[in-house]
Structures are given as structure tokens and as C-alpha cells.
Image: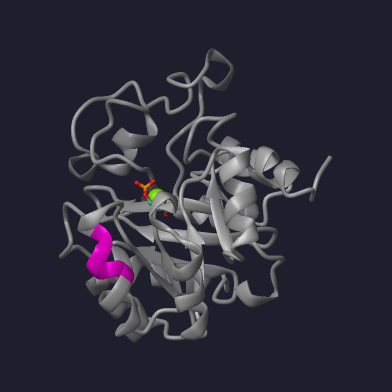
Amino acid sequence: MLTELPRPVIFAHRGASAHAPENTLASFELALAQGADAVELDAKLSADGEVVVFHDTTLDRTTDGTGRLAQKTLAELRSLDAGSFFSEKFRGEKIPLLSEVFEAVGKRLFINVELTNYSTPRDQLVEKVCELVKKHALEDRVIFSSFLASNLKKAQRILPQVPRALLALGGWVGAWARSFGFAFGDYAALHPYFADVTAQQVNRVHKLKRRIHVWTVNKAEDIVRLHSWNVDGIFTDDPQLALRAMGRRT
Ligand code: G3P
Ligand code: MG
């Protein structure tokens, strides 16, 4: 259960993505080796309806492919290299299926599944992710998050026992989500951009008896400050650095 983890929970953002290619099995295994409590990943559907783990809408930045992920079949996606953009050492890493990540680390790490069908919001992503959570019996090891409240409502209908977190964009565009959107929705946690967070904001969330997990924090001084404000979780690309900054690792 999320509430049983040490606070702040250290979520390795897209895995230990400062040291391995983001959203690959290598980055999730490394997060575990570095002592992270949890990983964050981005779930999307391939053109043939398989749940894959990938951040961008297009393939160009992190693979040797081009074009939109949603227009490629799983077979096409699996033929791509998702490691060498980061370093030659990781050539051969593939875009993982969500089920592979669940199998690899699901019993050892808590998993924040971000529902990222932002360009295809009417697809079957939420239904399919929920099915996989059930199949792998990970209901008490997963938290769903999304910038789209409709995704979280759908997840609540299908798997009410899995906690949900509302993501808020940085700056003024995220102001409504951080205040009314969060307060009037049925969410276990708020996931704001760290630079928008104040000690008062942390207290407001705690008064609602809910949690605040902040993204994405990669500097020791920011981690120390947010820890002193009692945030409940920190997303970082570098779990090793975060744990050292808080004195949980040497
Ligand atoms: O979940 C925190 C963070 O991952 C949200 O933004 O773009 O990195 O998925 P993004
Ligand atoms: Mg994400």
C-alpha cells in the first residue's frame, strides 16, 4: 500500500532516467538497484491496442523510428531501438509492454502508471491498463495518475480500490487543477510541478487528509527543501541522488 511506504516516497521518474534510457526495463531495474521505493511510467496504446510504456507522442526523440506511436503496431514498435539515443551501452533496449514492467518489478516496487492518452483520449487505454493491473494482482501496488480527470473517473469506475492522483501542469495553466479540480475530485493525491509548491500548499493538501507528490526534482537542494515541507512523495530522474540528499543512503 502507498500509505505504508517511507515518506517521502521516492518515485524514479520514467525509471532511473538520469542513468539509463527512460521508460525501459533497464531504467526500471536500475531504479530498484538504486533503492527507489517506486517508479513512474507513461502508458499508451499501440495502433493494435497493446499497452506500451513510452513518454512522447512521437518516436523521434528516444528511438531510431519516426512518426506517431499511436499509428504503429506493437510489432513495428518492438523492432525499434529505445536505448541507443541515451548511450551505445543501452543499444538493444526495447519499448516495453506494461505487462513486462509489471512482471519485472511489480512485486518489488510501487508503480505510478500515468495514463497518457492525451492525444487519443477516447481510446481504450484505461480499460486495458485496469485489466492488466487485475491480471497481475497489483491493485495494492499501483497508483494511477493523469492530467485528464476523465481518465481517472473511468479508472475509479473500473478499479475503485486503486488510488488516483491528479496531475497539474506547471504555472497558471495548472492553477485550477491544483485548487478546485483537486479539492472537489475524488483523489488520493495531488501531483503538481515542484516549482509551484509552497509549504502552505502542502499543508492545504494535508488538511484534506490527502497526499502531495511533486515532479520532477533533480537537485539536492530542492529535494531537501521539499522534504522539510513534508511532501509525501518526490519524482526524480535520479533516485540515488534523492536518497543521498535525504540521508537515506550513503
Ligand atoms: O508524473 C509526473 C510527470 O511524469 C508528469 O509529466 O511529462 O514527465 O509525464 P511527464
Ligand atoms: Mg509521466
Tell me which corner region of the image, top left, top right, bottom left or bottom right, holds residue 33: top right
Give the quadrant of the C terminus.
Answer: top right
Magenta residue span: 174-178
Q: Main secondary structure of the magenta part?
A: helix
Query: With respect to residue 96, does 129 lie above or below?
Result: below
The answer, for residue 51, to whether it is visible in the render is: no
Query: With respect to residue 84, does 138 lie above or below?
Result: below
Query: With respect to residue 39, does 130 lie above or below?
Result: below
Residue 175: say if magenta.
yes
Q: Position of residue 149 (x, y in %)?
A: 26, 72
Query: Number of marks in the image?
Result: 0
Q: Position of residue 29 (x, y in %)?
A: 65, 42
Side (left or right) of 50 relative to 15: left
Please report the residue visible at 53 percent of the width from the left and 35 percent of the height from the top: 17
Q: Position of residue 242 (x, y in %)?
A: 66, 44
Task: Decide which of 80, 172 is in the foreground and name it.
Answer: 172
Please report the residue visible at 57 percent of the width from the left and 61 percent of the height from the top: 233
The answer, for residue 182, to whether it is visible in the render is: yes
Task: Decide which of 158, 77 is in the foreground and name it.
Answer: 158
